[in-house]
Image: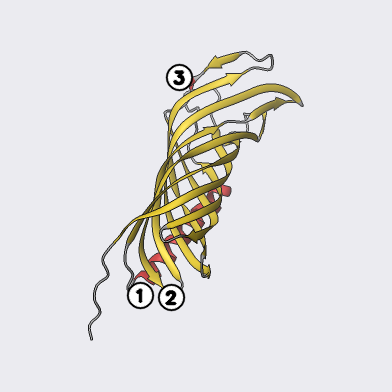
């Protein structure tokens, strides 16, 4: 059900951007790059009721580089496309009938492809909502048993993790080109990470709180207005 809500958010962001683009004020396109990092609460959702273990959120870390291209503006609203390359750790603690069964640790290089709608909340403060798909490329996976034994299970997980995500956040401009970014994000996998196993149906789910630094590296030269 959550993935359907996120899909709705994605289409809403894209429709809003498309609706306003034809009426957009003249805007100087600009490109930003940045770095971000933060904490994750990661677990598995289950597409199959045969997975009877309880998956509990586990604290993880994420970090990487981002880029954002702003292409349109309408009054106090702006529209942009954002992507990046993030190192992300995922995987939950596992319980069965109330007993600790260990944990999974999965690492990915993740590429989000988000549409962004932003609006000016104050002279130096901009709020934004973002949504879109993401692609995760598996780097490795381990399972930790209840007794602490660690086992490599990289060959048992799918090489790609595809999902959708949504985000809410704000940027605070300081200096001429810098901005501080605070963002909360939710991501839901739409493909199984264990499609080759005897009991497939596990999918990644995560909640992220990220802090970042944004820098404007390019702005197109403004077009002179006609008298």
Residue at 32 percent across and 73 percent down: it is 26
Find disc 2 in the rendering and name its residue: 75
Q: Position of residue 213 (x, y in %)?
A: 47, 49
Mark 1 and mark 2 in contact? Answer it, CB < 8 Å: yes
Point out the tag, 2 or 3, that comes first from the N-terminus: 2
Distance of label 1 from label 2 (alpha carbons): 7 Å
Q: How many marks?
A: 3
Q: Is residue 107 visible?
A: yes
Q: Position of residue 24 (x, y in %)?
A: 36, 73
Q: Nearer the viewer, residue 14 or 176?
A: 176
Find disc 3 in the rendering and name its residue: 155
Mark 3 and mark 1 in contact? Answer it, CB < 8 Å: no
Q: Is residue 1 visible?
A: no
Binning the other alpha carbons within 10 Å of mark 3 as few (below 14), some (14 to 19) or many (20 upward) gives few
Distance of label 2 from label 3 (alpha carbons): 51 Å
Point out the tag, 1 or 2, that comes first from the N-terminus: 1
The secondary element bearing badge 2 is classed as: loop
Quadrant in the picture for the C terminus: bottom left
Find disc 1 in the rendering and name its residue: 25
Residue at 46 percent across and 73 percent down: it is 76
């Amino acid at each position: 059900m959550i993935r359907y809500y996120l899909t709705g958010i994605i289409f809403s962001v894209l429709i809003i951007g498309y609706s306003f683009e034809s009426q957009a004020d003249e805007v100087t396109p600009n490109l930003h790059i940045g770095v971000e990092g933060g904490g994750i609460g990661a677990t598995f959702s289950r597409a199959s009721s045969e997975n009877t273990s309880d998956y509990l959120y586990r604290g993880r870390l994420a970090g990487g580089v981002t880029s954002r291209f702003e292409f349109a503006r309408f009054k106090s609203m702006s529209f942009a496309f954002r992507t990046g390359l993030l190192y992300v750790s995922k995987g939950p603690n596992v319980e069965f009938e109330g007993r600790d069964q260990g944990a999974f640790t999965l690492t990915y290089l993740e590429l989000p492809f988000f549409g962004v709608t932003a609006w000016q909340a104050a002279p130096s403060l901009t709020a934004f909502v973002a949504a879109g798909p993401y692609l995760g490329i598996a780097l490795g996976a381990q399972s930790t048993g209840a007794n602490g034994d660690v086992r490599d299970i990289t060959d048992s997980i799918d090489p790609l993790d595809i999902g959708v995500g949504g985000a809410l956040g704000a940027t605070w401009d300081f200096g001429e080109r810098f901005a501080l970014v605070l963002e909360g994000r939710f991501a839901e996998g739409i493909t199984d990470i264990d499609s080759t196993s005897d009991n497939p149906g596990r999918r990644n789910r995560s909640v992220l709180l990220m802090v970042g630094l944004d820098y404007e590296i390019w702005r197109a030269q403004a077009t002179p207005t006609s008298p």
